[in-house]
Image: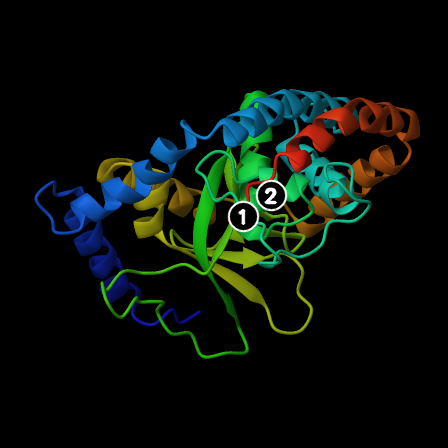
Amino acid sequence: MDIAKPKLIYELIERDLQLLSDKNSKFAGGIQEIQTAVYKSSISNSILFEQTLYYKKFLSMIANTVKEIGLPNNSISYSQVIENLIFEGYLSSGEILIPYKIKDNIQPLDLLGFAGIDVIRREGNCRHFSSLHSDIFHILDLYYDIFFCYDWVSGKTFVPPIDADYGYLASNHVANLIKYNGRYYIHDAYNEKYFYFTNQFTAEQYEKKGNQCFLYYSPVETKIFNNKSYRQILKQMNYFEESSLKPHIGINELNDIINETNDRFYNSTKILYDFREEALPYIKKIVSSQIKQ
């Protein structure tokens, strides 16, 4: 697959990562502001403080249910249970979650670590899904990471996603990085897809129907929003490369895990009913504390 002169792109990434690592860089102040501004405002906001307290308690309940239904110690199975809980409305204030959009006077809580609250309010896009997923995996003590990327369909001409103002490799999508049998994979719950790595930048969708979907890693945004060091990011990119060179899980095995998980999920009526009854008070508390613009 031609990814538009990968060596040139890699050099661009290295340059930008070095720039972001330089404390004297003209971007350093802006990056620090991105990472701390919302936090500073949030600790003085009593409504937000109340929401996050209920959210953290709710996460523990979700994690217990995921563990009870999913295949034991299987990150793919646990990811699938989380996806089902979201789309079947068990984690939100209504029966079915709706696509995110700015509406009325409700503002999305795009806070690092708390974006999952929007999913519970029946809103949310990819970044909210990924944040909720990562919060649950953290409680389950499983490997997780938020994967900033650029999505690209094989039927289109690939153009490196470079921001015109800064020269960064930008992202337009977020998914979750998980590990299964020592390999890195991507679970895109928002689009209900799974991906495997084909090189240190690119992950390919498993389902091959029509034009194939790819996710192209954006390390610069990982640096900004996940607060990783230059060394950590390059190390992670080497892990992606290693995963791409070793045999990944086959589509049949993946589908077997998903199908068995779905069977367990939809047959767990008593577990899901009890979870919903216990969860509703927390959901109502979170939703009733909405922040007005």
Q: Quadrant of the N terminus?
A: bottom left
Image marks 2 and 1: residues in contact by CB distance under 8 Å: yes
As drawn, 125 above or below 263: below
As drawn, 180 above or below 195: above
Residue sitting at the far left? 24
Location of residue 83 in the rendering, given as x and y in whole percent from the top left corner: 70, 43
Which quadrant of the figure has residue 259?
top right
Give the left or right position of residue 270, taking residue 71 as reference: right
Residue at 60 percent across and 43 percent down: it is: 118
As drawn, 107 above or below 138: below
Give the left or right position of residue 152, taking residue 16 as reference: right
Viewer-nearest residue: 126 or 46: 46
Number of residues whose C-alpha sits closer than 10 Å to that of mark 2, classed few (under 14), some (14–19) or many (20 or more): many
Location of residue 8 in the rendering, given as x and y in whole percent from the top left corner: 23, 66
Give the left or right position of residue 11, taking residue 194 as reference: left
Q: Which residue is mark 1?
A: 108
Q: Earlier in the sequence, mark 2 or mark 1?
A: 1
Residue at 27 percent across and 60 percent down: it is: 168
Viewer-nearest residue: 286 or 273: 286
Q: Report whether residue 158 is seen.
A: yes
Location of residue 179 in the rendering, given as x and y in whole percent from the top left corner: 53, 35
Distance in Å between CA atoms under marks 2 and 1: 6 Å
Q: Report whether residue 143 is seen.
A: no
Location of residue 75 in the rendering, given as x and y in whole percent from the top left corner: 62, 32
As drawn, 173 above or below 31: below
Give SS at disc 1.
loop
Q: Which residue is mark 2?
A: 118
Number of residues whose C-alpha sits closer than 10 Å to that of mark 1, classed few (under 14), some (14–19) or many (20 or more): many
Give SS at disc 2.
helix
Viewer-nearest residue: 5 or 100: 100
Residue type at mark 2: give it.
Answer: Asp
Scheme of colours in the image: rainbow
